[in-house]
Amino acid sequence: MNVHANILMSGIAADALPVAPGLEVATTGGPVGTVVRGVDLAADVRPDMVFSLLAIFNHSGLMIVPGQERLTPDRQAQIARWFGPSFVRGRKEGKRDQLPMTENPFVQLLSNRDQKAAGLIPVEDRNGAATQPLGIHSDVQDYDVPPDVTILHGAIIPPPSAGGNTHFGNLYMAYDDLPREMKQRLDGAKWRPHSTYRTMRGVQQKEAMANPEADRDSPVLHPVARTHPVTGRKALWVSSFTEEVVGDWSREEGVALAKQLFEHVAQPKYWYTHIWSPHDVLFWDNRCVNHRRDSWDSSYVREMHRAQAGGSLPF
């Protein structure tokens, strides 16, 4: 499902935003995403450009900045703070779910280069020659206050034929398309995510594989319809992390409703597919976008640097 070439995910026109001189802005042509050229993120970025990038991000769901060969983890961590305080799993709420880090303590290293050292089950011990795909989700939904933004730098990217594409879903559109009766039913409803240890088990962290905490309910509850604090629009904020929808009904009904809503957001019409090039930098908005990643041929190294920031309580 395409949108008008000049309309951003939030529904406003791209030329209505304050685009600083030197920036080139174009939508992806799909239901999510804006491509921005004309900025070197490794350099000192002019204040008017930073202001523009933040505005574009808040109205795009996904901001793609290609060709960032010079970007280092230290600089990536600095850029993340444009969006708010740095966010790192395991540093809050007493949870022991930290992932491997780059040389910067606020930038995670996502790589199949040395999985044993990272405390993960190596690919060859669980999947043969292909990495596991990652299901539809927004990042860190097992926390009360997840990060607002994820910034992912494709440091080492396999050829497109090897797989590893990332897909992004428009949760505004998914909410808008619900029947009025369903919107009324979901008004004020909450959903319960998988527990942190179950999430860790899902990405094959050894510490969680036999941990009974993975089978216990999470105490976290999130709004099913999440309101974006900048655009004011509602997003259908459910994902593969959703255990049940909690409301004036039984658990069985809540589990069935979660499945129904998940199947709704998974419809192809809401999704844009990003085929990675080396040194693409993607900024996505965890408040209104879901994403998933395809598997890839693990004979190729795929190495990503991930920074996360912000953290507004979902409402």
Image (spheres, rainbow, N blue to C red):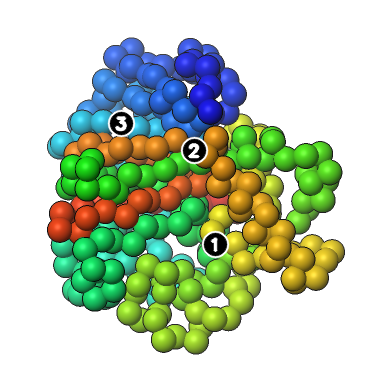
Give the image quarter of residue 272.
top left
Asked if one can make out residue 142 in the rendered structure from this viewpoint, the answer is yes
Residue at image mark 1? 241
Q: Residues within 10 Å of mark 2 (few under 14, many from 20)?
A: many
Amino acid type of disc 1? Phe
Q: Nearer the viewer, residue 102 or 217?
A: 217
Q: Where 86 falls versus 256 (above or below)? A: above
**Residue at 34% over, 74% down:** 205
Q: Where 236 falls versus 106 (above or below)? A: above
Q: Nearer the viewer, residue 14 or 169?
A: 169
Amino acid type of disc 2? Trp
Viewed as shown, does residue 271 lie left or right of 24?
Answer: right
Cβ–Cβ below 8 Å for labels 3 and 1? no
**Disc 2, SS:** strand
Q: Where 227 falls versus 106 (above or below)? A: above
Residue 239 screen position, x and y as percent: 56, 55
**Disc 3, SS:** strand
Mark 2 or 1: the one toward you:
2
Cβ–Cβ below 8 Å for labels 2 and 1? no
Residue at image mark 2? 271
Dot placed on the residue nearer the N-terminal end, 2 or 1: 1
Q: Nearer the viewer, residue 160 or 222?
A: 160
Q: How many marks?
A: 3
**Mark 3 → mark 1, Cα distance in angstroms:** 28 Å
Viewed as shown, does residue 140 lie left or right of 219?
Answer: left
Residue at image mark 3? 65
**Mark 2 → mark 1, Cα distance in angstroms:** 18 Å
Viewed as shown, does residue 301 lie left or right of 46?
Answer: left
Q: Where 23 falls versus 291 (above or below)? A: above
Asked if one can make out residue 148 in the rendered structure from this viewpoint, the answer is no
